[in-house]
Image: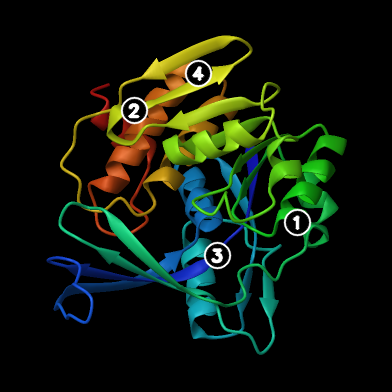
Amino acid sequence: MSRVVCAGHLNWDVTLRVAALPDPDGEVNVDERRCGGGGSAANVATGLADLDVEASLLGSVGDDEHGRNALDELVDGGVDVGDVVSVSGAETTTKYVVVEPSGEVMVLGCSGANEAFEAEDLSGETLAAADHLHLTSQRPETAARLAERARAQNVTVSFDPGRRIDERGYGPALTSVDYLFLNDREAALALDAFDLREQTLVLKHGPDGAEVRGGGERTAHPGYPIDVVDTTGAGDAFAAGFIAARVGGADDHRALEVANACGALVSKAPGARTSLAWDRIRAFLGE
């Protein structure tokens, strides 16, 4: 069985569903409130475990109830959390995700412990046993060092830098990994600022599907029309599906097919996670 290490944010999510976002100085009722583990690295790891990939997580939480609950959810989902750092006296990072009826989200973040881990907190044994390392949003120097350590072990690396790509100095990490997961906005910023000809770009076009560009070739998939409930975690599910398919030997077209199915299934349900078991993926694909 393939093994993938995910490194990055591990949060506690509070999801608030509202009829509409309030105007300035206004107020709206919360129609539904849900709490649970979140964070891109943790979401991808959970999705990989659902897809029968051995998944390990490198991240950090506070030594509080939210951190303990988030770790319990991951363990219950089959994720190895042996390299997660628990920071004494710190609070687990909390994200407030406000979802409107269209499924679009607005995120409010509280500072916490989710970037307290260092690259060296990933044990040599965990890295040596891995087939792939997936990086999500984290401190730029940590991401670059993790990519360097993976290259020394001949472990392939992917990176999904997230919405703050233009606010953080990710250049050394962006240009040293094998795969970059980017949405349209992130791709425009990255391609304008960096030479990414050596990277394989996995470009997410939202409702218009996705494509892979690399080595002078392009593979595209149109995605699937669905009724969107909540887009939280859709990009993480997409990444989990793509990585699981590729480490399992699939070509780019099959990987995009699976990735788009995973993203669609998460978008059809509330919250950042839903079951991505292969039987659900195959049923969605009509196989």
Nearer-N-terminus badge (3/2):
3
Residue 70: % across, % down = 49, 71
| Colour logic | rainbow
* Numbered disc 3: secondary structure: loop
Identified at 69% across, 86% down, the residue is 88
Identified at 34% across, 27% down, the residue is 209
* Badge number at residue 252: 4
Nearer-N-terminus badge (2/4):
2
Toward which corner of the image does residue 148 lie, by quadrant? top right
Toward which corner of the image does residue 276 lie, by quadrant? top left
* Badge number at residue 209: 2
Q: Nearer the viewer, residue 286 or 251?
A: 251
Residue carrying label 1: 142
Residue 15: % across, % down = 31, 69
- Establish if 63 lies above or below 152: below
* Badge number at residue 40: none
Residue 72: % across, % down = 50, 71
Q: Is residue 211 visible?
A: yes
Nearer-N-terminus badge (4/3):
3
